[in-house]
Amino acid sequence: MRTGRKFTAVAAGIAVATLALAACSGNDGDSSGGGDTGDAAQAEVFTWWADGSEKAGLDALVTVFNQQFPDTEFVNGAIAGGAGSAAKELLQTRLQSNNPPDTFQAHAGAELTDYIKAGQVQDVSNLYDEFGLRDSFPKDLVDRLTVNGKIYSVPSNIHRANVVWANPEVLKGAGLDPAATYATLDDWFAAMDAVKENTGLTPLSIATTWTQINLLETVLLSDLGADAYTGLWNGKTDWQGPEVTKALTDFGRAISYTNEDRDGLEWPDATQQIIDGTAAFNVMGDWAAAAFDGAGKQAPTDYVYFPVPGTDGVFDFLADSFTLPVNAPHPAGAKNWLSTIGSLEGQVAFNKAKGSIPARTDANPADFSAYQQTAITSFGQDTIVSSLAHGAAAPGAWVSAISDATVNFTTGVSDLETFQTELVDAWLANVG
Ligand code: GAL
C-alpha cells in the first residue's frame, strides 16, 4: 500500500484562469452520461502507444480488457509519435468535426483541463462511484483530473520524467565509475567531457523536439529547485530572471553534448543508443525502462539509472488518463474500457509492461521491477512537480510556444538571449 505524497503548490494562476474560462464558456463538459447508455459492441481507444514497448503496454491492457469484457471489441486507434506529437493534432481535428473516438489518452493536469474547458470530455464522476474508485487514487492526482468538483477521466499510470539512463560499459571506457551519481549539472557535464574525450561516443543521446523539452524541464528543475520550477507555471517565478538565464545556459551546454541527428529521431532511437552502447547518457521518462526490459537488458549490468543531477528527491510527474469524449459513438464500450483502466488487474498488467507505476495505491510493489520499486518509493516520499513536456504543467498553447522557442534555439536560429525573450513572451501570453 502506498501512502500519501505531496505535490508542490498546484499551478494556482492557471487553475484560477481555467475556472474563470470554464465559467464564461458555459460549457465545462457537463454533458453527463458517464457511459451508461449506448453501444457496448466496441470501444475505439485513441492513444499514441503504437509501437515497441508502448504497444506492449497497450497489448497487456487489452488482454485484461478482453478477459473482463469479451463482448466489447477493442478497436485500436493508436497514432505513432512519442508524447502524442502526431496524435494530439489529429485528435483535435476529430473532436472539432464531431468524430470523436470512444475514449482517448490525455495527461492529467493542464492538458486535460484544456479538453474540459473546450467542452470535449464528459464528467465521469458517476463511474468513480460505480467502480468504487473514490479512494483508489492519490487525492492530489484526482484533483488534477477534476474541475468544479467533477472528475473527467480515469488515470492508468504515473510516469517519472527526470531520469538519466546510462550505459555502464561506455562509462567505464570513459574512465568513469558506472555506479557514480552526480550532485550537480557541472559534475555531470565533466563526466560528459570525459566521454567525449576518451571514447568519441555521444555523451548525451536525445531525439525530436518533445524529448528536448523533456531535457529542458529537467535542467530548469535542477537549477531552480522544485518550488521555483513550479513557480514558472503559476506566475511566481520570473522567466526574465538570472536563475532562468543560468538554466538556459546549462540547457545549451547539455544540447552541445547531444547527437546532431536528434531532430530526426524518436525517443526509442535515443534510448536504443544506450542499449547499443553508442551513447553514454539519455534523459528520458521511465517508459525507457520498458524499452530496456523489452531488449532483455538488466540493471545494473546492462544499464544504470539515477535522477537527473540536482533533482534527487523530486519526482517530475505525469500521468496518462482516459476520457469519455462528448458524443462518443460507443459510450458503453468506453465505460467498459474505463472500468478496466481503473481496475487493479488492468493497472498491474499495464504498468508492469510500461515502465510506469500504477496510479492506484493498492498495488503490491513486489510485483514490479527494481526500477519501478524505486519509482514507487520516490513517488511516496519525494516532492512532486509537474512535467512540462507531458501536459501536466502548462496548457497546450504554452507548451507549443515553448517548443517553438526551443527549436529555434537548438537549431541555431536564435541565441540564448532571444531564446529567453521568446520564453518570456510565451509566459506573458499564457499566464501574465
Ligand atoms: C508520454 C506518455 C507516456 C509515453 C511517452 C512517450 O507523454 O504519457 O505514456 O507514452 O509519452 O511516448
Image (cartoon, rainbow, N blue to C red):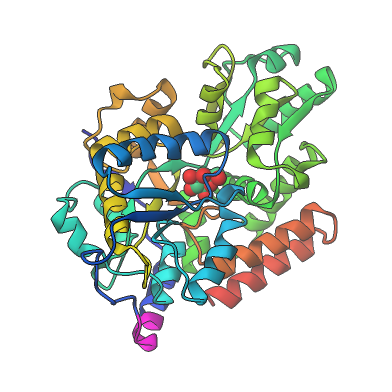
* Residue drawn at point x = 53 percent, y = 28 percent: 306
Image height of 240 relative to 258, above or below: below
178 part of magenta stretch: no
Rendering coords of residue 203 (x, y %): 75, 29
Question: Residue 202: where, in percent of width, then height?
Answer: 78, 29
| Highlighted magenta segment, given as a residue range | 20-27
Please give the name of the residue rendered at 59% of the width and 15% of the height, measured from the top-left corner: 302
Across and down, in percent, residue 355 comes to 45, 33
Considering only vertical position in the picture, is 170 above or below 321? above
- Front-most of 352 and 12? 352
Q: Is residue 374 left or right of residue 72?
A: right
**Up-down: is 333 above or below 371?**
below
Residue 225: tell me if it is visible. no
Q: Residue at x 64, y 46 (%)?
A: 211
Which part of the image, by quadrant, shows the N terminus? top left
Q: Main secondary structure of the magenta part?
A: helix
Judged left or right of residue 304, residue 116 is left
